[in-house]
Image (spheres, helix red, strand yellow):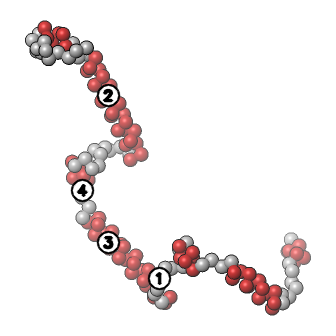
Amino acid sequence: MAQAREDVLDESPISPIESRDGLEKHLQHRPEVQDLKNRHILLDTTAAPALQAQQQELQRQQLTDNLKKGLEHRPERDWLVERNILPDSTAAPALQSQQRELAAAMRRDSIEKHLQHRRKPEDLVKEGILAADEAPVA
């Protein structure tokens, strides 16, 4: 197998002109600096290369500190539930939307059931609960 690879390997010397032409060709298709920064290949900083690692570590540490401060001032879950910011549910977040839909369907069914057993306006007028002019027209 190693013998087969040696057979296809081109060992002819490359002339300096071919090498320069190949290099120029690659340099013409080289991506722009801003493109490399947008793709996070190059750092978007003006700091000296020797200081870039320290600058990144400082930024990471500042971000960590800000996150810790924010978490310290985070309101308690009970407080958020009391104000209807968070749902009062122990279900998994993936199931909470289905739980809300089920609760709404159950409320609709309950209302519909109560409306079916609702007393008729005529009966309410007969019993003196409604006046004749208050009875809704069917």
Nearer the observer, 136 or 21 = 136
Task: Identify the mark nearer the N-term, 4 or 2.
Answer: 4
- Residue located beneath label 1 in the image: 45
Q: Secondary structure at mark 3?
A: helix
Q: Secondary structure at mark 4?
A: loop
Q: CA distance from mark 1 to mark 3?
A: 21 Å
The N terminus - image quarter:
bottom right
Q: Secondary structure at mark 1?
A: loop
Of circles 3 and 4, which is in front? 3
Q: CA distance from mark 1 to mark 2?
A: 59 Å
Q: CA distance from mark 2 to mark 3?
A: 46 Å
Nearer the observer, 69 or 38 = 38
Of circles 4 and 2, which is in front? 2
Which numbered disc covers residue 76? 4
- Residue located beneath label 3 in the image: 66
Three-letter code, disc 2: Arg
Q: Residue at x 44, y 80 (%)?
A: 56
Q: Quadrant of residue 137?
A: top left
Q: CA distance from mark 4 to mark 2?
A: 33 Å
Which numbered disc covers residue 108? 2
Q: Residue at x 90, y 76 (%)?
A: 7
Q: Position of residue 93 (x, y in %)?
A: 38, 47
Three-letter code, disc 4: Glu
Q: Position of residue 115 (x, y in %)?
A: 26, 20
